Image: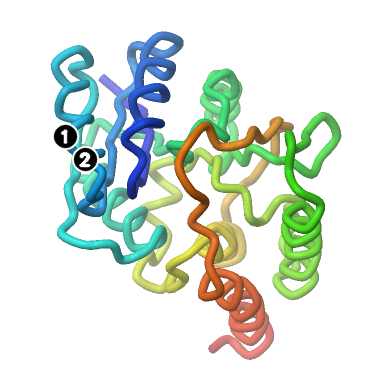
Amino acid sequence: MQKSVILLPTYNERENIGVIIPEIFTTHPDLHVLVIDDDSPDGTGDRVKELKKTYPNLDLFSRPKKEGLGVAYRDGIQRALKDGSVQRVILMDADGSHDVQYIKDMLALSNTHDLVIGSRYIKGGGIENWEPWRYALSRYGNLYAWILTGLPVRDLTSGFQCFGRDLLARMKLEEVHASGYAFQIDMKYHAIREAGASVVEIPIIFKTRRGGESKMSPHIIREGLMTPLRLFRRRILGI
């Protein structure tokens, strides 16, 4: 039987994980969920273990320390693909900003496309209740990345996406170096430009996180500036 797996990276998301997991399985009971927890001091991992008693398709991948979003996702993808029945891998946030209602359409489109992206910046998409500075950072950051990478994607920093197994098998994940939110740009570049992925965007409304604190930091912003430059050099010079 073919499986679809949702990867949820977490660090101090105990409150949110207790909401998003029931939402996923209420609407999509046949899906599998792998929570990748970086030793959260708030007990996120323990909360997942409690939820496993109710949801048999839930699993926990406990990592020994916090190493960043990119490393967590790479490790989670490699772990998921060890199961030969896994055919689709969905990446999404655990904080409630990605609505589970869009999963159905993503899975349907994954039958005809290697990569399906939930986009805030195409017709029908949008963002709820963001401060103007954060919206500007995201909007112009996407424009900056789009110019340098030349990718046919409007929302390059979207973290809500579905990858087909064949695409992930073609990708060289060890060459996706970004560790923060720039990982999303890095993954799309390698998927589309280097692994030849067919891609489609669907509109989503991005919601405000339910609880906890944003993981935004100066390092993440710097990496967001440097990663498109690195990919531009790779695109032009092949290095």
| Quadrant into which the N terminus falls | top left
Tell me the colour scheme of the image. Answer: rainbow
Going by the numbered disc 2, the residue's amino acid type is: Gly
The reply, left or right, for residue 135 in relation to residue 21 is: right
Label 2 SS: loop
Going by the numbered disc 1, the residue's amino acid type is: Asp
Residue 43 image label: 2
Q: Residue at x 21, y 21 (%)?
A: 51
State the CA–CA distance, disc 2 to disc 1: 5 Å
Q: Quadrant of residue 120?
A: top right
Q: Residue at x 51, y 75 (%)?
A: 219
Front-most of 174 and 21? 21
Residue 46 image label: 1
The reply, left or right, for residue 151 in relation to residue 54 is: right
Q: Residue at x 80, y 71 (%)?
A: 147
Q: Quadrant of residue 143?
A: bottom right
Front-most of 107 and 155? 155
Report the number of numbered marks. 2
Disc 2 packing (10 Å; few <14; some 14–19; many ≥20): some
The reply, left or right, for residue 55 in relation to residue 220 is: left
Label 1 SS: helix
> Residue 125 at what x, y percent from top left?
78, 34
The reply, left or right, for residue 222 in relation to residue 151 is: left
